[in-house]
């Protein structure tokens, strides 16, 4: 996100919309990827779905969790 923000602000500065890029002095945080990640069990997925704001979001979360649907695709499905 910081890379995208930096690029946007850099363009704004170049076009004269802002006088300074406030993200130039931000320290970048580095992290090592281990390749490890946590996966919810089917019971945990169902518990999260039950706790959703409404039945639609619960169903959307369940489908996403069990099919590997990514956030962007799920958001697109929710808007359709």
Image (spheres, rainbow, N blue to C red):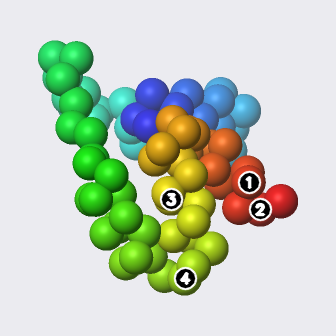
Q: Is residue 14 above or below residue 57?
A: above
- Mark 2, residues whose alpha carbon is within 10 Å: few (<14), some, or many (≥20)? few
Residue 1 vs residue 69, the one in the foreground: 69
- Mark 4, residues whose alpha carbon is within 10 Å: few (<14), some, or many (≥20)? few
Q: CB under 8 Å between callouts 4 and 1?
A: no
Q: CB under 8 Å between callouts 2 and 1?
A: yes
- Mark 1, residues whose alpha carbon is within 10 Å: few (<14), some, or many (≥20)? few
Residue 69 vs residue 33, the one in the foreground: 69
Image location of residue 50, percent across then percent down = 40, 76
Kindly indicate the quadrant of the structure image that contains residue 33. Answer: top left
Q: Earlier in the sequence, mark 4 or mark 1?
A: 4
SS for dot 4 = loop
Q: Residue at x 26, y 48 (%)?
A: 41
Camera-nearest label, 2 or 4: 4
Q: Residue at x 53, y 48 (%)?
A: 64
Q: Residue at x 28, y 59 (%)?
A: 43
What residue is shown with label 1?
Answer: 77
Where residue 61 is drawn, which disc sits there?
Answer: 3
């Amino acid at each position: 996100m910081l890379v995208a923000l930096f690029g946007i602000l850099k363009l704004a500065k170049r076009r004269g919309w802002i006088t300074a890029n406030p993200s130039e002095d931000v320290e970048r945080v580095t992290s090592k990827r281990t390749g490890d990640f946590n996966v919810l069990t089917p019971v945990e997925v169902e518990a999260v779905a039950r706790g959703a704001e409404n039945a639609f979001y619960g169903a959307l979360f369940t489908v996403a969790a069990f099919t590997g649907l990514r956030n962007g695709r799920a958001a697109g499905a929710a808007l359709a």
